[in-house]
Amino acid sequence: MPGWGPGGGGNNPGSATLTATFRSGNNATNGPWELYLEDSFGDSSGGQYAWGTSNGQLESGQVDVQFNAEAGGGSNSVSFGVAGAPALAISPASYGNITSVGFYVSTNGIQSSETTEWLELTVTFYDANGNPNQLDVNSDQLPATSSSGGGASSSYWIATPDSGFTAVSVEIEGVIHLNASVATPGSTALLGDIFVWTS
């Protein structure tokens, strides 16, 4: 089973080959982006998503997420999307094997209550023959964070393929949940990143 543990060490987000981001934005299908996908070669794509509101609060409910990075890069080889919104896609220049995947979530602590969390998460690495190396993250180790107006909070976890397993592609599936005590807490009040590092 792939490795799973707190982020840090050599897993610097700034050195990631691929980055997918979801954030509170303005909780609408126009204006600032809620979804963004980019690579270290300068390719990027952004999109809008209305997370939803309940009793004057931002309340996303359970939102399905899918991310795919195919072997080697090339045309539309990387995609990222959430249920109910068109998937984003980019076409990076070629990259090597996938060495690790990171998951970062944060809240800025400005509102009286804020939550950014994964409720379910599965990471599947594949080798050149299509053999899977799958990690189903335990509920007590899911990336999740919350704050109550007293300052920012974050959580950062890293998944790595089994020792000796050469991963050329990765598929990430899961469910996220965002909540804030106001409907529009600020573009980056609730934030989540997926990072992919390659050789």
Image: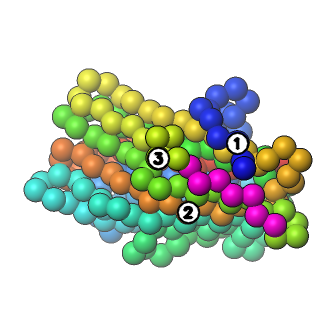
Q: Is mark 3 on a helix, strand or loop?
A: helix
Residue 150 against residue 162 in the figure, above or below: above
Q: As drawn, is 122 to the left or to the right of 64?
A: right
The residue located at (64%, 28%) in the rendering is: 8
Can residue 134 be found in the magenta stretch? yes
What type is the residue that disc 2 sits on?
A: Glu
The rendered magenta stretch, by its main secondary structure, is classed as strand
Residue 110 against residue 170 in the figure, above or below: above
- Mark 1 or mark 2, which is nearer the start of the sequence? 1
Total number of numbered discs in the rendering: 3
- Mark 1 or mark 3, which is nearer the start of the sequence? 1
Calculate the distance from the C-alpha at mark 3 to the C-alpha at mark 1.
Answer: 16 Å
Residue 113 against residue 48 in the figure, above or below: above
Location of mark 2 (residue): 173
Magenta-drawn segment: 131-137
Residue at the left extreme of this rendering:
55
